[in-house]
Amino acid sequence: MKAKPKLSRWDDLVEAAPAAGLDEVETRAMNDELTRRRHGDSIFQSLMRLWPGDGRRPQASARASARAMARLRAAFRASVSDLADGAQTADEETRERVGALLRHLVHARHPQDLWHLRTAIYTEVARAFDQAEAEARLLMLNRQLEQGKSLLRRLLDRG
């Protein structure tokens, strides 16, 4: 009998989940993380990373720009964190929309990706609260985005 080859350490974690007593939600989250890591990008996105100049920054500025992007992502996630909490009690469609929005925020690799997500954030906040709250959050996100973009620009010009 031939042994089944293991693909990665994630396979070990997923197989060990029922034995460890993890519930279905935690197991699904581990599977989602496995899927996201393996198949998170389209073929086009993978090819664009190979384009000259993309991702070939010096190490110091790469770390600093990664920190700047992490701050931007955190600001965007904070603007919808109460929506994610409220989505637990909302209908299925709202949960799916907010979940998709959070996944897009996590996968954003460039400030331009976050720029395009502003309209989705505005829409979800306006649906959950009102237009004034959505505009206030959008104004805060625009400020954060401009600060982050200028920092990234300075880091890339220096590096």
Image (spheres, rainbow, N blue to C red):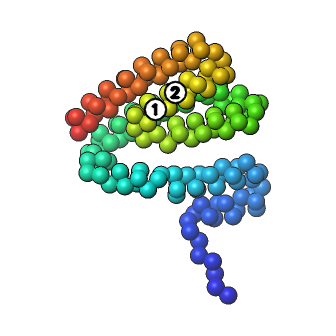
List the residue tagged with mark 2: 119
Q: Is residue 110 left or right of residue 155?
A: right
| Circle 2: residue type | Thr
Res 77 quadrant in image: top right
Q: Residue sitting at 48 percent across and 18 percent down?
A: 140
Circle 2 packing at 10 Å, graded few (<14), some (14-19), many (20+), is: few
Q: How many marks?
A: 2
Please say if 115 is above or below 24: above
Q: Residue sitting at 51 percent across and 51 percent down?
A: 40
Q: Quadrant of the N terminus?
A: bottom right
Circle 1 packing at 10 Å, graded few (<14), some (14-19), many (20+), is: few
Question: Which numbered tag is attached to residue 116?
Answer: 1
Question: Which numbered tag is attached to residue 158?
Answer: none
Q: Are marks 1 and 2 in contact (CB under 8 Å)?
A: yes
Q: Is residue 30 left or right of residue 40?
A: right
Please say if 37 is above or below 63: below
Q: Is residue 97 visible?
A: yes
| Circle 1: residue type | His
Q: Residue sitting at 66 percent across and 31 percent down?
A: 84
Q: Is residue 86 left or right of residue 134?
A: right
Q: Is residue 78 visible?
A: no
Distance from label 1 to label 2 (Cα)?
A: 7 Å
Q: Secondary structure at mark 1?
A: helix
